[in-house]
Image (cartoon, grey):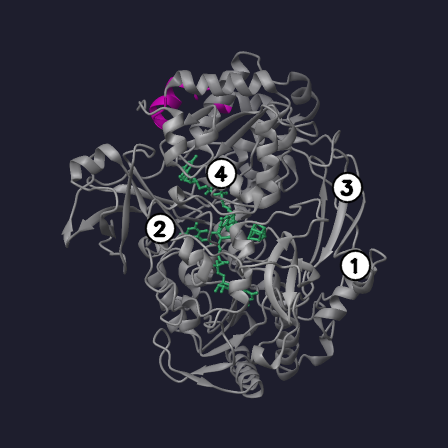
C-alpha cells in the first residue's frame, strides 16, 4: 500500500499545475494529459490595444459562470478575459473560459434548423425554415399529448438556456418527466442529503480560504476547475490549512495534500463512520454545539458504535492509524474546518449515506457558521420574471413516476432519469413518446447508452435544441440551433463573496451579448424566442410570460433597482455591501425519523458495493482540466491542449501485464462491451491496483464534430451497469469494471 515515491516526484508527474493555471488564467500543464501535444496559440496573436471591450459577459463553458469581458475588433470577438471588476473570479478565467472564442466561431456549430430525413442515430439532414421546424415540433408534440397525455413528453435539460423551456414543459404543458443532469447525474444527492441533515442545501458553501484544515472526498480541484472555488481553496492552502484528500488516485489535489488517503473506491462512508465513532468515543467533538443543536445524538452514537478503526481499515484498505490521524487532525483544528460536501457525488449508488455522513461530521465538529466552516453567504435580492403560470402543473404532479411507484422519496426536483427511461422502454406505467433534449447530451451523460438509445428509438418524436453537433443531436428528428452564451441575454448571476476581499460583498451580474448576432450567424435563435414560438404553435400563447430575453433580464434587474443600461455603466457587475456570513447556527439531524419513516436507515450507514470480477478493475472517472464533459470536445484550442483521455493504470499491474506508458489500447467492460475507440495508457504508481481512471467526455461518435470525433474513449459507453441510489433515484456510475485490449488481445488485470 505504501508508496515509495516522494511527494516531489509526484509533483512532477501529476496534474497539480492545473490548479494554479486556473488562477493565472493560463493553461494546465501537459502532465495532466500524460500524452504529447502541441501548445497554443491560445488567443489571437498580437496586441489588443485596438480592440473595444464589451462588458456583461458570463461564461457558460461550464456552469460556474465566471464574469467575463470580451475584446472586440471589427465586430468580432478576439479575446475573452475575466471581468477585472469581478469579486468572484476577478480577472482570471480558466482555459475553457478563454477558449469560448473558439466555440463562438466553430465552423461545426449548428447553423440552421434541420430535419432528419434519415434514421435516428444515422441522420441525413435537410435544412428547413424555422416556421417549418417549429410547426412540425408543435404538431408532433400535440399529437403525443392528445394520444397519451402531456406526461408522455420527456425533457432532458441542462444549463442556463434550458430553464425557460423547462418551466414551459412542466407548468404549462404539464409533464413531470423532466430529468436534469445537474440533479440526477451530479449533485442532487448532495443537496437532498444535506437538507435531510442540516436542513439546507450546501452548494459549495465551505469557507476554505479561512480554514485550518480541509477534507476532500474525491473532489479533485485543479482538474475540477471552478475559478473562484479553486481560488478560495488555494488561499486556504497558502494560509497554512492542512489538506486531507481521500481518493483512490493521486489527483491534482492529492498532490498538494498533507495526507493522501488512498481509499478503496465505494467505501468512503465506512471511513467517515469510523472517524466519527473515534471522535465520539474519545470525547473529541464539539460537545457544546452538539448538545445545543444535535437531534437524536444518542441514537447516532449507538448506530455508529460498530465502526471501529480496524473495521474501517479492512473495509477501506487504508491503515487504521491513518484514519485516526485524519480524525484527530480535523478535531484539533475544529471548528475551523472545511468538510467539503463535494459536487459530482453520483458515484456508487450508496451515495446519499456518504453525503449524510459528511453533513454529520460537519455538525460533530461544530464547523457551522464559523470561519473556515460551513457558511452560507447571503446573496442580493433580485426580481422575478419569465416564470410560466401553473396551467397544468397539477397534472404533472399527479403523474410523477417516483411518487406513483413510491420510490426515491428524497429525489431532487424532477424525475429520476432511470424511471423515465424504464417507463419509455416498457410502456409502463404509461407510455413516453416524445423527447426533448435542451442543453443536455444524455448519450454521454446518462449511464447505459444502449438503453438510452432504445428509449430514443421508441419515441414518436425527438426534438433537440443545442449549439454543437454532439452525440445526442444524431438522434433528433428536428434539430434546433441556439445562439451561444456570448450572443444572448439569459441568466442573472447574483452572488456573494467574503474571503478574498476581506469584507462581505454581494454582486449582481447579467449575461449580456458580447457580440451581436449578424446574418453571418445563420439562423440561430435564443431560448426565449424558440420556446415562445413553440408555445404559440401548441396553443399556449396566452400564457407566455415575457416576449424576449432582454425583457426578462430588465424585469429581474428591476427587482434590484437596476437596468441593463445601469449595469453596463457599472462595467457589467453591480457590487453592494453584503451580510456577515458567520454566526448562523444550524440544527443537525444526526438521526432522522423522516428517513426511518420512509424505510431508510435513520443514522448514516455504510452499504458495501460489488467487488471487481477477476481480471478487471473498477472504472472511475473525473474532470479533464481543459475540457467540460463532451461539450468542449470540438474546441480547437482545447482539443489541441488535451486531445485524448489517457487511462491511468497502476505501474506494478502494468508491468505484469506487459503494458508501457503510451501504449494504445481499447477497453472492454464486465458485460463484454468494448470501447468504440482507443486511447493511450498512463502508467503510474498514483492509482490503486483495483482501479483505473480516465477523464470523462471524450470519444464523441458524431462525425459532424470534425475535430473531436473518435478522440479518446467515452467512459459512459463502458458504464452499462447502473447503480441507483435508493433514497434519491440518482445514478451511481462507478460500479463498472474494465480491462484492456492490446493488439486485439484481451489482457487480465492482476488482483
Ligand atoms: N475542468 C473542468 N472542471 C469542472 C467540470 C468540467 O467538466 N471540467 N465540471 C464541473 C462539474 S459540473 C462538476 S459536478 C465538478 C465535478 O468535480 P468533483 O466534484 O471534484 O468530482 P468527483 O467525482 O468528486 O471527483 C473525481 C475524483 O474522485 C475520485 N474517486 C473515484 N471514486 C472514488 C471513491 O469511491 N471515493 C473517493 N474518495 N474518490 C473517488 C477520482 O479518482 C477523481 O480523482 O467539476 C466541475 N468542474
Ligand atoms: N460517465 C460520466 N457521466 C457523467 C459525468 C461523469 O463524470 N462521467 N458527469 C456528470 C455531471 S457532474 C454532469 S454536470 C453531467 C453533464 O452533462 P451534460 O450537461 O449533458 O454535458 P455536456 O457535455 O456539457 O452536454 C451538454 C449539451 O449541451 C450543449 N450546449 C452547450 N451550450 C449550450 C447552449 O447554450 N444551449 C443549448 N441549447 N445547448 C448547449 C452541448 O453542446 C451538449 O450537447 O454529466 C454527468 N454524467
Ligand atoms: S470555471 Fe472556467 S469554464 Fe467555468 S465558468 Fe469559469 S471561466 Fe468559464
Ligand atoms: Mo456536475
Q: In which quarter of the image is residue 501?
A: top right
Is residue 567 among the parts visible in the rendering? yes
Residue 170 position, x and y percent, is: 61, 66
Q: What stretch is highlighted in magenta?
A: 303-318
Which of the numbered marks, if any, corresponds to residue 505? 3
The quadrant of the picture occupied by the N terminus is: top left
Residue plotted at (41% across, 73% down): 475
Which of the numbered marks, if any, corresponds to residue 219? 4
- Closer to us: mark 4 or mark 2? 2
- Closer to us: mark 4 or mark 3? 3
Q: Earlier in the sequence, mark 1 or mark 2?
A: 1
Instruction: Calculate the distance from the C-alpha at mark 4 to the C-alpha at mark 1.
Output: 35 Å
Instruction: Calculate the distance from the C-alpha at mark 4 to the C-alpha at mark 2.
Output: 19 Å
Q: Earlier in the sequence, mark 4 or mark 1?
A: 4
The relative height of residue 272 versus residue 476 in the rendered view (above or below) is: above
Q: Which of marks 1 and 3 is nearer the N terminus?
A: 3
Which of the numbered marks, if any, corresponds to residue 567? 1
Q: Main secondary structure of the magenta part?
A: helix
Amino acid at each position: 500500500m505504501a508508496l515509495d515515491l516522494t511527494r516531489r516526484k509526484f509533483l512532477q508527474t501529476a496534474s497539480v499545475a492545473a490548479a494554479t493555471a486556473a488562477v493565472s488564467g493560463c493553461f494546465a500543464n501537459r502532465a495532466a494529459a500524460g500524452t504529447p501535444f502541441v501548445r497554443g496559440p491560445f488567443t489571437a496573436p498580437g496586441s489588443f490595444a485596438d480592440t473595444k471591450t464589451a462588458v456583461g459577459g458570463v461564461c457558460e463553458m461550464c456552469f460556474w459562470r465566471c464574469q467575463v469581458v470580451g475584446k472586440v475588433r471589427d465586430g468580432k470577438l478576439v479575446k475573452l478575459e475575466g471581468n477585472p471588476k469581478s469579486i468572484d473570479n476577478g480577472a482570471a478565467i480558466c482555459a475553457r473560459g478563454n477558449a469560448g472564442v473558439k466555440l463562438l466561431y466553430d465552423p461545426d456549430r449548428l447553423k440552421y434548423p434541420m430535419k432528419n430525413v434519415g434514421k435516428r442515430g444515422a441522420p441525413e439532414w435537410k435544412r428547413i425554415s424555422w416556421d417549418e421546424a417549429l410547426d412540425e415540433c408543435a404538431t408532433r408534440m400535440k399529437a403525443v399529448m392528445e394520444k397519451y397525455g402531456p406526461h408522455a413528453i420527456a425533457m432532458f435539460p441542462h444549463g442556463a438556456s434550458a430553464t425557460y423551456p423547462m418551466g414551459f414543459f412542466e407548468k404549462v404543458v404539464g409533464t413531470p418527466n423532466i430529468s436534469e443532469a445537474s440533479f440526477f447525474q451530479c449533485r442532487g444527492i448532495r443537496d437532498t442529503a444535506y437538507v435531510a441533515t442540516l436542513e439546507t442545501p450546501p452548494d459549495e458553501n465551505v469557507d476554505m480560504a479561512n480554514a485550518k484544515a480541509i477534507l476532500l472526498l474525491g473532489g479533485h480541484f485543479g482538474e475540477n476547475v471552478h475559478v473562484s472555488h479553486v481560488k478560495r481553496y488555494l488561499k486556504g492552502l497558502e494560509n497554512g490549512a492542512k489538506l486531507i484528500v481521500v481518493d483512490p488516485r493521486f489527483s491534482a489535489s492529492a498532490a498538494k495534500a498533507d495526507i493522501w488517503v488512498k481509499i478503496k473506491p465505494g467505501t468512503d462512508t465506512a471511513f467517515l463512520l469510523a472517524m466519527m465513532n473515534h471522535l465520539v468515543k474519545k470525547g473529541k467533538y464539539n460537545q457544546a454545539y452538539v448538545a445545543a443543536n444535535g437531534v437524536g445524538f444518542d441514537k447516532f452514537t449507538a448506530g455508529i458504535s460498530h465502526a471501529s478503526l480496524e473495521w474501517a481499515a479492512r473495509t477501506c484498505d487504508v491503515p487504521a492509524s491513518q484514519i485516526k490521524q485524519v480524525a484527530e487532525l480535523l478535531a484539533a483544528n475544529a471548528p475551523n474546518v472545511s468538510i467539503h460536501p463535494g459536487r459530482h457525488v453520483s458515484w456508487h449508488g450508496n451515495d446519499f449515506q456518504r453525503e449524510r455522513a459528511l453533513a454529520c461530521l460537519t455538525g460533530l465538529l461544530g464547523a457551522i457558521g464559523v470561519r473556515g466552516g460551513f457558511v452560507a453567504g447571503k446573496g442580493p435580492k433580485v426580481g422575478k420574471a419569465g416564470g410560466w403560470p401553473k396551467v397544468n402543473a397539477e397534472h404533472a404532479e399527479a403523474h410523477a413516476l417516483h411518487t406513483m411507484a413510491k420510490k426515491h422519496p428524497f429525489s431532487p426536483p424532477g424525475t429520476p432519469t432511470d424511471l423515465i427511461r424504464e417507463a419509455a422502454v416498457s410502456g409502463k406505467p404509461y407510455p413516453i413518446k416524445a423527447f426533448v433534449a435542451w442543453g443536455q447530451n444524455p448519450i454521454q451523460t446518462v449511464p447505459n447508452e444502449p438503453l438510452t438509445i432504445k428509449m430514443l428509438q421508441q419515441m414518436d418524436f425527438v426534438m433537440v435544441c443545442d449549439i454543437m453537433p454532439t452525440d445526442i443531436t444524431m438522434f433528433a428528428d428536428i434539430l434546433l440551433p441556439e445562439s451561444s452564451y456570448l450572443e444572448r441575454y439569459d441568466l442573472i448571476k447574483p452572488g456573494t463573496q467574503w474571503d478574498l476581499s476581506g469584507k462581505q460583498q454581494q454582486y449582481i451580474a447579467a449575461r449580456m451579448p458580447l457580440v451581436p448576432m449578424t446574418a453571418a450567424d445563420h439562423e440561430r435563435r435564443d431560448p426565449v424566442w424558440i420556446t415562445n414560438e413553440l408555445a404559440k404553435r401548441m396553443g399556449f400563447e396566452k400564457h407566455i410570460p415575457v416576449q424576449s430575453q432582454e425583457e426578462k433580464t430588465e424585469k429581474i434587474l428591476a427587482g434590484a433597482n437596476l437596468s441593463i443600461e445601469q449595469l453596463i455603466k457599472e462595467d457589467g457587475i453591480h457590487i453592494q455591501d453584503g451580510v456577515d456570513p458567520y454566526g448562523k447556527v444550524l440544527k443537525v439531524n444526526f438521526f432522522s425519523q423522516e428517513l426511518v419513516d420512509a424505510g431508510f436507515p435513520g443514522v448514516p450507514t455504510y452499504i458495501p458495493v460489488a467487488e471487481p470480477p477477476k481480471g478487471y478493475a473498477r472504472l472511475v472517472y473525473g474532470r479533464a482540466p481543459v475540457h467540460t464533459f463532451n461539450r468542449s470536445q470540438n474546441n480547437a484550442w482545447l482539443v489541441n491542449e488535451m486531445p485524448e483521455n489517457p487511462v491511468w493504470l497502476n505501474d506494478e499491474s502494468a508491468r505484469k501485464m506487459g503494458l508501457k506508458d503510451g501504449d494504445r489500447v481499447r477497453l472492454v467492460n464486465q458485460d463484454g462491451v468494448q470501447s468504440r475507440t482507443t486511447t493511450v495508457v498512463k502508467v503510474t504508481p498514483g492509482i490503486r491496483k483495483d482501479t483505473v481512471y480516465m477523464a470523462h467526455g471524450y470519444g464523441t461518435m458524431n462525425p459532424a464534430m470534425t475535430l473531436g470525433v473518435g478522440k479518446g474513449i467515452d467512459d459512459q459507453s463502458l458504464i452499462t451497469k447502473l447503480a441507483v441510489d435508493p433514497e434519491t433515484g440518482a445514478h451511481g456510475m462507478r460500479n463498472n469494471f474494465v480491462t484492456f485490449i492490446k493488439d486485439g488481445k484481451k489482457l487480465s488485470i492482476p488482483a
